[in-house]
Image: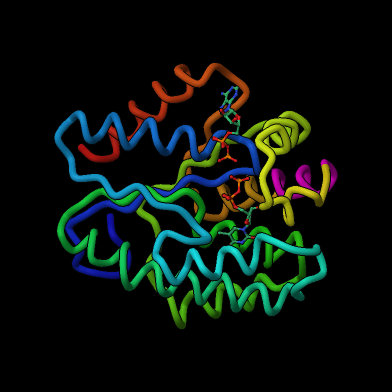
């Protein structure tokens, strides 16, 4: 299943609009797989390693115009490279299952389409500096207005992207569905506007199948 290396592990990513339930479902999947005896590394982007968490603060806090989309793309890619070197690749080499809350498809969406017209640059940097693709990407699809309400209800300082509003979230939702078609070999789309346990049950079934 792996596209770029000899790693024995599996690399699963979660994608979707802000507030769609990615973090909740990533955590529940990690708990389920650990209970089944797997070594699981649960991580997130931007961040996931100490250096990348420092970059996370730079990109997620502050005014909307703090960075241009081009600079953002470089910062997110730098964070990903550090995360990959220090956390993801070592875990996959050990044979662990890595579950990552957002990854390159978020960069394709946010820097590539929503914030700028940089999709070609995102793909070029990915091919040059990252190379590792997920084995399985779970897209949690849901109504943008509900997702935004959930995300804003959480509060906190990381609202630089959430303050873009419902119209942008709707564009991002459509963009993620387009990515799911483009990379149909690794994407699965899950309806997110349901009870947490029902979504978790579906994800457990499809991951169990994928691991078999
Ligand atoms: P994301 O990581 O996609 O931004 P979270 O998992 O952090 O989303 O969820 C955002 C908020 O919505 C949290 O407060 C979480 O408890 C809540 N939530 C997550 N999934 C559901 C669901 N299926 N139904 C209702 N609330 C949910
Ligand atoms: P995250 O903490 O996952 O937000 P949420 O839990 O609300 O879904 O990600 C923070 C923001 O970073 C999110 O709005 C999407 C954005 N982002 C990018 O713009 N590019 C990227 O490459 C990544 C990984 C995230």
Q: Position of residue 42 (x, y in %)?
A: 35, 47
Going 53% across and 41% down the picture, which residue do you hit?
139
Going 48% across and 61% down the picture, which residue do you hit?
47
Q: Position of residue 19 (x, y in %)?
A: 64, 37
In this picture, residue 51 sits left or right of residue 143: left
Question: Which stretch appears magenta?
Answer: 166-174
Q: Is residue 109 above or below residue 65?
A: above
Quadrant of ligand 2: it is bottom right
User: Which of the pair 50/33 is nearer the observer?
Assistant: 50
Q: In this view, does 81 lie above or below 109?
A: below
Q: Where is residue 161 in the image (x, y as percent from the top left)?
A: 73, 54
Going 68% across and 51% down the picture, which residue do you hit?
157
Q: In which quarter of the image is residue 90?
A: bottom left
Q: Quadrant of residue 17?
A: top right
In this picture, residue 61 sits left or right of residue 209: right
Q: In this view, does 33 lie above or below 126?
A: above
The count of marks equals 0
Is 41 within the magenta?
no
Q: In this view, does 115 lie above or below 126?
A: above
Q: Is the magenta stretch mostly helix, strand or loop?
A: helix
User: Which of the pair 120/11 is nearer the observer?
Assistant: 11
**Residue farthest toward the front in the current orientation of the protein:** 156
User: Which of the pair 50/107 is nearer the observer?
Assistant: 50
In this picture, residue 155 sits left or right of residue 30: right
Q: Quadrant of the C terminus?
A: top left
Q: In which quarter of the image is the N terminus?
A: bottom left
Instruction: Confirm whether residue 123 shows in the render.
Output: yes
Instruction: Confirm whether residue 186 shows in the render.
Output: no
């Amino acid at each position: 299943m792996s596209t770029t290396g000899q790693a024995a592990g599996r690399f699963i990513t979660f994608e979707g609009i802000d507030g769609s339930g990615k973090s909740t479902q990533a955590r529940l999947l990690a708990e389920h797989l650990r209970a089944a005896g797997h070594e699981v590394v649960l991580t997130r982007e931007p961040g996931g390693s100490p250096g990348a968490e420092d970059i996370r603060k730079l990109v997620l806090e502050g005014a909307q115009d703090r960075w241009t989309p081009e600079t953002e793309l470089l910062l997110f890619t730098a964070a990903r490279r550090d995360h990959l070197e220090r956390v993801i690749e070592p875990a996959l080499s050990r044979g662990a299952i890595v579950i990552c809350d957002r990854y390159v498809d978020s960069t394709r969406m946010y820097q590539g389409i929503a914030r700028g017209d940089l999709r070609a640059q995102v793909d070029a940097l990915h091919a040059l500096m990252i190379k590792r693709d997920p084995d399985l990407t779970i897209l949690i699809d849901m109504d943008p207005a509900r997702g935004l309400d959930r995300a804003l209800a959480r509060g906190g300082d990381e609202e630089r992207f959430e303050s873009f509003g419902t119209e942008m979230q709707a564009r991002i939702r459509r963009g993620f569905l387009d990515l799911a078609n483009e990379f149909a070999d690794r994407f699965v789309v899950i309806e997110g506007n349901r009870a947490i346990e029902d979504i978790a049950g579906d994800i457990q079934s499809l991951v169990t199948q994928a691991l078999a």
